[in-house]
Image (cartoon, rainbow, N blue to C red):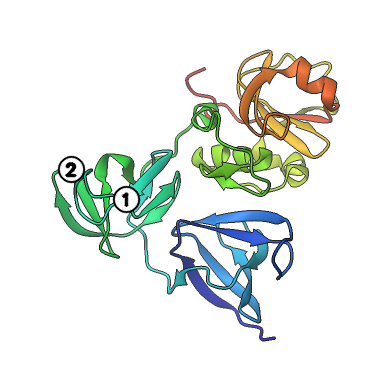
Amino acid sequence: MTTTMTDRQITAPHAVLLEEPRPGVPQTSEMIRGERFRILEERDGWLRAENAFDGHVGWLPPGTAHAEPVAPTHRVRALRADLHPAPTHKAPPVGTLSFGSLVRLDGRTENGWAATDDGLWLFAGWLEPVEAPAAPDHVATALRFLETPYVWGGRSSFGIDCSGLVLTAMAAAGTVSHHSSGLQRKDERLGVWLSDHGRDVAYQRGDIVFFPGHVGIMLDATRLLHATVFTMSVVVEPLAEVAKRAEINGVRRPAPGSTAGA
């Protein structure tokens, strides 16, 4: 066992963070292409990593692709973006990146395609500069993940869980929280606290509603958008139906501006 504090960067399209350094244990979170992490410990090829994005700590399996950090130039704004070996849609994709992935372009462009620093090509319309303004409507961002498969510990368009959906949507609006519904419930950055039980709330679009071990975002005054094991996907359901399965134990309202478009 060795202990280091090395900064690295994920070069795989996405990478799981596991609870313990061995196969078959629960995934606790996920990192996506371009995110930086610190190696806190190494054990038989397993890396205990702290994600610089949200501070989450978990174990990266051996063989996870990573490299020395480079400054990204662009972010994937599409839900998913295929990597091609040539600047044409006819070249079969060799990989796929999730929403929010970070890439460094090498300056080459051709027919609406842009080259990455590892020699692959992305459709330029899927990208935005890293300095692009935040997307203020976290509800609109979360809606893009409708029907995405539910994956425990997921936070990408390949698979996502309830707190991963809230984390991703709010981060796109400029507020990075935690990949944990329990920690999100306590996080004042996610908005003002409205209620401990939700019974006295006049719900609005964008409200974040908490349950024991679960969280979702109000689409409007009556419907909840959430990633749920009940359907194993991201769905919209009447809040009243969800509350029959689990009791509401908190409501936060993000600051005005993160619900633009309501």
Tell me the residue at 59%/37% (across/down).
149
Label 2: how many residues lie within 10 Å, few (<14), some (14-19) or many (20+)? few
Q: Are marks 1 and 2 in contact (CB under 8 Å)?
A: no
Tell me the residue at 40%/50% (across/down).
96
Drawn side of residue 201 relative to residue 207, left or right:
right
Q: Please say if 194 is above or below 57.
A: above
Tell me the residue at 84%/17% (across/down).
199
Q: Please say if 24 is above or below 112.
A: below
Q: Quadrant of residue 164?
A: top right
Q: Position of residue 139 (x, y in %)?
A: 55, 27
- 110, 217: nearer the viewer: 110
Q: Nearer the viewer, mark 1 or mark 2?
A: 1
Q: Position of residue 172 (x, y in %)?
A: 50, 40
Check the picture and name the quadrant holding the N terminus: bottom right
- 194, 101: nearer the viewer: 101
Drawn side of residue 212 relative to residue 148, left or right:
right
- 141, 259: nearer the viewer: 141
The residue tagged 2 is 112
Q: Residue furthest bottom?
A: 2
At label 2, the amino acid type is Gly
Residue 98 visible in the snapshot: yes
Residue 198 visible in the snapshot: no
Q: Which mark is residue 93?
A: 1
Drawn side of residue 121 relative to residue 165, left or right:
left
Q: Position of residue 82 (x, y in %)?
A: 35, 47
Label 1: how many residues lie within 10 Å, few (<14), some (14-19) or many (20+)? some
Label 1 residue SS = loop
Label 2 residue SS = loop
Earlier in the chain: of badge 1 and badge 2, it is 1
Q: Position of residue 6 (x, y in %)?
A: 55, 78
Q: Quadrant of residue 49?
A: bottom right
Q: Which mark is residue 255?
A: none
